[in-house]
Amino acid sequence: MRVWWWWSAIALGLLGPVHAEIGEIHVNSGPSEEVPKPPQDHSALWIHSGTRIYLVLVDAKGKRAGVDPKTLATLETIPNSKCDREFIENRYTGDAQAELDQHLTLEPAKNGVYQLRLTGIQPGPYKIEISAQSKEGSSLPSKDLDGLISEGEEKTFRLSFDPSANSALTVVEEAPRKAG
């Protein structure tokens, strides 16, 4: 009934002229204009020491992250690196820098071999915890380093990091350098 009324209204001129247009249609037949985005890199390397050492991580280009044992400056020249540090006071002697709690973060972390340099603040045990994450975001097996260090003693470790899934961190202590 309504359709009949509508057509009748148009025929009798009760409704104005009906005008309809079809919009333009754009068809892109060439290659896609959108460039696919590369997968996001979720790789990470986390190093924590909460003991009697200064810790400096050095990449293959000589860039560093950590705390400089001579100047006590925070170093963050490795791309995507961050160093959080907190000196701990010796409650018996009042020495303001008796120990150092240090967190190094590389996000995203580059594949490669790094040097991990330790310098003793005071004699005693040290502990370092190293964790990593692959590019896809899965956890990689972690490593813990512990040992004894003397005040001013330097130790160097070679840390190999591969952000591929199912890879593992490799940490090897390097032979001490002889002066001369």
Image: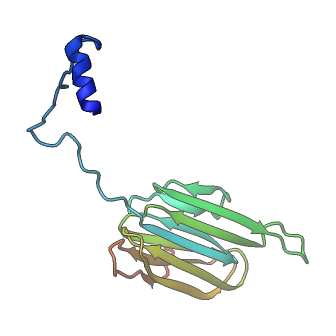
Residue drawn at x 43%, y 76% as measured from the top left: 159
Residue drawn at x 34%, y 80% as measured from the top left: 167
Q: Observer-nearest residue: 149 or 22? A: 22
Q: Quadrant of residue 35?
A: top left
Residue 111 pos. (x, y %)? 35, 67
Q: Observer-nearest residue: 178 or 113? A: 113
Say how many tags the image has: 0
Q: Quadrant of residue 135?
A: bottom left
Tell me: residue 139, above or below residue 39: below
Give the farthest residue toward the front.
Answer: 1
Give the farthest residue toward the left.
Answer: 29
Residue 10 pos. (x, y %)? 23, 17
Residue drawn at x 16%, y 30% as measured from the top left: 25
Tell me: residue 18, above or below residue 1: above
Q: Observer-nearest residue: 145 or 122? A: 145
What sort of colour scheme is used for the picture?
A: rainbow
Residue drawn at x 54%, y 64% as measured from the top left: 105
Residue 3 pos. (x, y %)? 25, 31
Residue 174 in view:
no
Q: Quadrant of residue 55?
A: bottom right
Residue 61 pos. (x, y %)? 39, 58
From the viewer's perspective, tell me whether residue 149 is left or right of residue 42: right
From the viewer's perspective, tell me whether residue 100 is left or right of residue 141: right
Tell me: residue 59, above or below residue 133: above
Residue 33 in view:
yes
Which quarter of the rendering shows the N terminus? top left
Tell me: residue 67, above or below residue 17: below
